[in-house]
Image (spheres, rainbow, N blue to C red):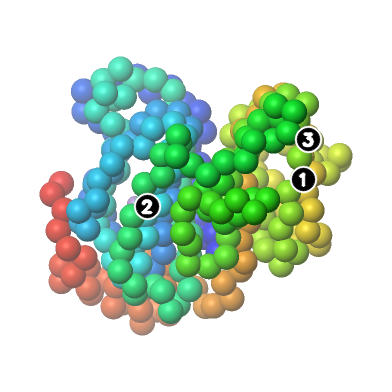
Amino acid sequence: MSPFFLLDYNSKINFSARNEPRGVGVHPHRGFETVTIAYQGAVSHHDSAGNSGIIYPGDVQWMTAASGILHKEYHEQEFSLTGGDFQMVQLWVNLPAKDKMSRPKYQDIKNAEMARYNLPDGGGVIQIIAGEYKGIKGSASTFSPLHLYNARLNKGAKTTLSFPENFNTGFVIIEGGVLINGEEVALTDQFVHFNNDGDEIQVEALESSVILVLSGEPINEPIAQYGPFLMNSQEEIQIAISDFNQGKFGYLED
Ligand code: MN
């Protein structure tokens, strides 16, 4: 679903309390961006470019690995000690070839500061993580045209989303249930993949709902992927592996 390459969805799960935080140790990325969207729980992050932060419910971390970065992602210490519900999405957003070797970048977008559009009649709110909605620009900058929203709809709310027909568009139903185009019902944990055959989507919330909305212009370039590297050719993958082995991605303490 270019420009989105991967969607890692952790549906809501309750983690027991634990002294040693669960998570993923130091690992590299090159050629794309990781976008982490928190709904429940808390994750702490550190990377070799010196960025660190904690992502709480509603927050988004937009990390541009680009030419190469090392990072680690763990349950935040307090969350780990108490345990609790955990629900998150991590997206891998591809970069155009011309930007794959640009400098790493980090955008920390707090829930409270996120661009938003309040729907009329108390229908809820569209939080604009990136792109644009009704003329309101999203909080994150992107390298290719895309829209990413958290649509938080109250029961009975109706709204229309418009995207160019050639954009690849999908919904993750994070919470609740919605009626789409007056035809199809989508419920919690389901993914909706739209055909490229129209530019309007009607959504009606059957109950209080949260939808992650993704839509982007496809990057029509060759793809070569190996583990945490996403490039355009096998040769570039070999270079990434070699650069990583030579320590060119920097240093991060385990
Ligand atoms: Mn990672």
Disc 3: which residue: 158
Q: Secondary structure at mark 3?
A: strand
Determine the image quadrant of residue 131.
bottom right
Q: Looking at the picture, does residue 254 appear above or below residue 222?
A: above
**Mark 3 Cα within 10 Å, few/some/many (few <14, many 20+)?**
some
Residue 160: numbered disc:
1
The location of residue 75, given as percent across then percent down, is 31, 33
The location of residue 88, given as percent across then percent down, is 46, 37
**Mark 2 Cα within 10 Å, few/some/many (few <14, many 20+)?**
some
Q: Looking at the picture, does residue 194 appear above or below residue 205?
A: below
Determine the image quadrant of residue 248.
bottom left
Instruction: Write the residue at 40% across / 28% down.
Output: 41
Determine the image quadrant of residue 152.
top right
Tell whether label 2 touches label 1 (CB within 8 Å): no
**Total numbered labels placed on residues in the image:** 3
Residue 108: numbered disc:
none
Task: Pick whichever, 234 or 84, lies toward us.
Answer: 84
Q: Looking at the picture, does residue 192 appear above or below residue 27?
A: above
Q: Secondary structure at mark 1?
A: strand
Task: Pick whichever, 123 or 190, lies toward us.
Answer: 123
Is 192 situated left or right of 180 in this image? left
Identified by mark 3, the residue type is Lys
Identified by mark 1, the residue type is Thr
* Farthest-out residue, bottom: 235
Tell whether label 1 touches label 3 (CB within 8 Å): yes
Q: Can you say which quadrant of the picture contains the N terminus?
A: bottom right
- Which is nearer the N-term, disc 2 or disc 3? 2
Instruction: Write the residue at 56% across / 53% down.
Output: 137
Task: Pick whichever, 57 or 23, lies toward us.
Answer: 57
The location of residue 206, given as percent across then percent down, is 76, 27
Specify whether tag 3 is near ligand 1 (CB below 8 Å): no
Disc 2: which residue: 107
